[in-house]
Image (spheres, rainbow, N blue to C red):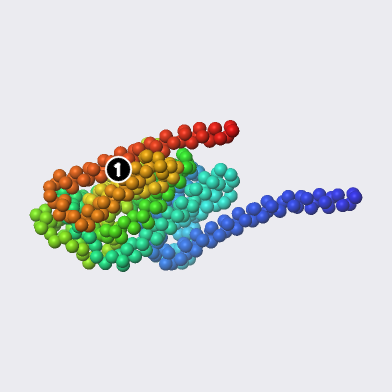
Amino acid sequence: MSARGPLVRNNLNQSKVHPIDRKLAFKLGLTALLFAAILALALNRDFYTESMTSAFLSLALASAVIVLGMIRRSWFDLLWVLTGSLFLAVLDYRGMDFQPVFMAGFSFAGLAGLAVLGTHTIFAEGHERKLLLYGFLPAVLFVGSEYMASTLLDITEALHPKTFDLFLYSFDCSLRVQFSFLMGQVFWTWLWVRFVCLVIYIALPLPLALVYAAQLRRKRENALAVMLAFLLTGPVGVLFYNMLPACGPVHVFGAAFPFHPPSIADAMRMNVAPLLLKGARNAIPSLHMAWVLLVWWNSRGLARWIRAIALVFVVLTVMATLGTGEHYFIDLVVAFPFSLMVQALCSYSLPFRSGARRTAFLFGTFVTLIWLALLSFTTRFFWTSPVVPWAMIIATIAPSILFWNRLMSAGTEEEPVRARAASASATT
């Protein structure tokens, strides 16, 4: 009996250790897979030249650092990100002999940020793991969404060789003000304005990550609806691109943009017909405008400095979308009901039968579709009087803002109701 006692105790001790060892091994294995995936991307020449050096995708990757910083708020994490960025840069430029490009630095930081954020997610426990997981997965999904954007736009161009640019341009001229040409002239007269606006235009992924991460730290349920809206805006917007494909005035007028616009009288007599045109069909609705509107509205309740950043992005994005010649003024107008529709669709915490969510969704959907139909078939109607198009713009933007406010207020009103219901169920 005495000889078997220590043996039994040793077996019991070993059985207690094994589950811990397996759990640790599993986490180490996941970490190794994460690092292997990041290295595979960083060392892939095609991914480097087509994606890591791209202005939009590199900043989409860099947005992971913002998510990490907002959630963890650790200087050590940023030090690890810097170290990882330098390590990846050395591998690519010394080991793989890739051509150095400035924007690739943001990609290195983003990949390192994903590595640090993913590692923390794997080794965290309980509530912290859930919080980090809600930061890590959307960061990966947003990069994937940005990566797929060009493919979806290429498909849209192949499906629609003709565009409706003249229809949109005719509407803009019916306002008796050609905003795209005027802002384009500002851009080429004051190059510093052009530079600042283009930086903001390209840096769109950063405020998306900032607002999402801030909401995630504030209240996880709100944050998931925000990220869902950010992610769905792209693919849903592409569906609308296929309904009324258009490219923007710079693609139509070429070198005549922005200093030689047709006169309003010539635009009134213009033969409005579809054009054979090359370029991305991403004019209406302006998804850049839709995204910054979502950023602004979902920054509600956050710190003032975040609200200020959101507002700056709204103002300068309006200028950039017009000044680059990639959009007509009507594209920005239609972005209001479109973004309202997306927000209402993604506000899953509110029952759809609730007046605020249902009204916002129906208004946003039908007004967006009505605009696409009117612009496709009744362009002469807008020339009846300048009052007609301006009144329609006001009748679009003002109710959109009103329903936005009601939708966001309904979300905050539901929170104490859900809290009381949860408390009541817990006591029973």
Place of residue 49 in the rendered image (x, y in percent of width and height, measured from the top left): 39, 65
> Furthest-left residue in view?
265
Residue depicted at 51% across the width and 34% down the height: 421
Disc 1 packing (10 Å; few <14; some 14–19; many ≥20): many
Residue depicted at 21% across the width and 59% down the height: 165
Is 187 or 265 nearer to us in this picture?
A: 265
Can I make out residue 25 in this image?
yes
Place of residue 320 in the rendered image (x, y in percent of width and height, measured from the top left): 26, 51
Q: Is residue 270 left or right of residue 48?
A: left
Is 294 or 139 nearer to us in this picture?
A: 294
- Identified by mark 1, the residue type is Ser
Residue depicted at 42% across the width and 63% down the height: 48
Residue depicted at 42% across the width and 64% down the height: 47
Quarter residue 170 falls in: bottom left
Is 168 or 197 nearer to us in this picture?
A: 168
> Furthest-front residue in view?
353
Q: Is residue 212 left or right of residue 254?
A: right
Place of residue 156 in the rendered image (x, y in percent of width and height, measured from the top left): 32, 63
**Which quadrant holds the C terminus?**
top right
Helix, strand or loop status at disc 1: helix
Quarter residue 406 falls in: top left
**Label 1: which residue?**
400
Place of residue 268 in the rendered image (x, y in percent of width and height, measured from the top left): 11, 55
Q: Is residue 277 above or below residue 363?
A: below
Count of labels shown? 1
Can I make out residue 306 in this image?
no
